[in-house]
Amino acid sequence: MRNRRRSTIGAVVAVVVVVVALAIISTRSASTSQAASRDAGKATEVTPADSSGATTTSSVASVSTATPEPSGPYTTPLMPMSVSVSKTSGLHSGDVMSVTATPSNGSQAFGVEARLCRGDASIEFDGQMLPTRAGLCIPKPFSDGTDSFIEVLNKPPYGPIAVTFRVGTGSQTFGLQDGTQSTITCDATHPCQLVLKMQYPNGFGFQGVPLAFG
């Protein structure tokens, strides 16, 4: 009789142990699933580990690339004109430059405008040649016997155009249309340029000729 009671008690204890063990296993599984869920939620904030085993957080930074402003004498690409100049260095005030603009590829030369401008300017548009608008070219001659602007209009058959320009040296400060001022200096320490605007069929183009003074 006692043996039967002991067997019954033992069976009950065994069942209790199994139930407790299952409860513990179930609790651990739930904890593991919750932890895995939390880790999965963080996966969008952390990048995979690199080859060294270190985990790095992702960061995105905006990068701005500054485009440098063009400077110095400019020539319009594919312009159907070629230019020859007599002298561009060792110039003195009053020296005469001879410039010849010759049409090429069967084109024609309708006219040439020439202005004395700042040496570091890159003149690509018509408005940039206007002294009081852009402040890049002198509005008047530096001195008597020199030029600031010359215009030569061609005649049929619209072949080569010869331009004679008397360069000057000095410094000018003048007002612009927006109320600011511009200063242009041409001398031995401040190179300038002769900017040519050449007109041909269906358009016009620009060429800057660097000038160095002695």
Image: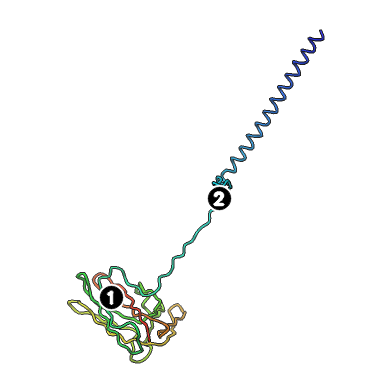
Which secondary structure, mark 2?
A: loop
Q: Which mark is residue 122?
A: none
Q: Image quarter for residue 100?
A: bottom left
Report the residue at 39% width, 81% height from top. Answer: 191
Task: Using the image as rendered, state which of residue 10 and residue 119 is in the foreground.
Answer: 10
Q: Are marks 2 and 1 in contact (CB under 8 Å)?
A: no
Quadrant of the frame with the N terminus: top right
Q: Locate residue 122 relative to residue 39 in the image: left or right.
A: left
Residue named by callout 2 = 58
- Where is residue 125 shown, x and y percent of the image? 35, 72
Quadrant of the frame with the C terminus: bottom left
Report the residue at 46% width, 65% height from top. Answer: 66
Residue named by callout 1 = 198
User: Alpha-carbon neighbours of circle 1 within 10 Å: few (<14), some, or many (≥20)?
Assistant: many
User: Alpha-carbon neighbours of circle 2 within 10 Å: few (<14), some, or many (≥20)?
Assistant: few
Task: Name the residue furthest bottom.
Answer: 144
N-terminal-most mark, 2 or 1: 2
Callout 1, which amino acid? Met
Compared to residue 188, the image places residue 104 above or below, namely: above
Report the residue at 31% width, 70% height from top. Answer: 76
Q: Image quarter for residue 34?
A: top right
Q: Image quarter for residue 33?
A: top right
- Where is residue 202 shown, x and y percent of the image? 25, 69
Callout 2, which amino acid? Ser
Task: Name the residue furthest right.
Answer: 2
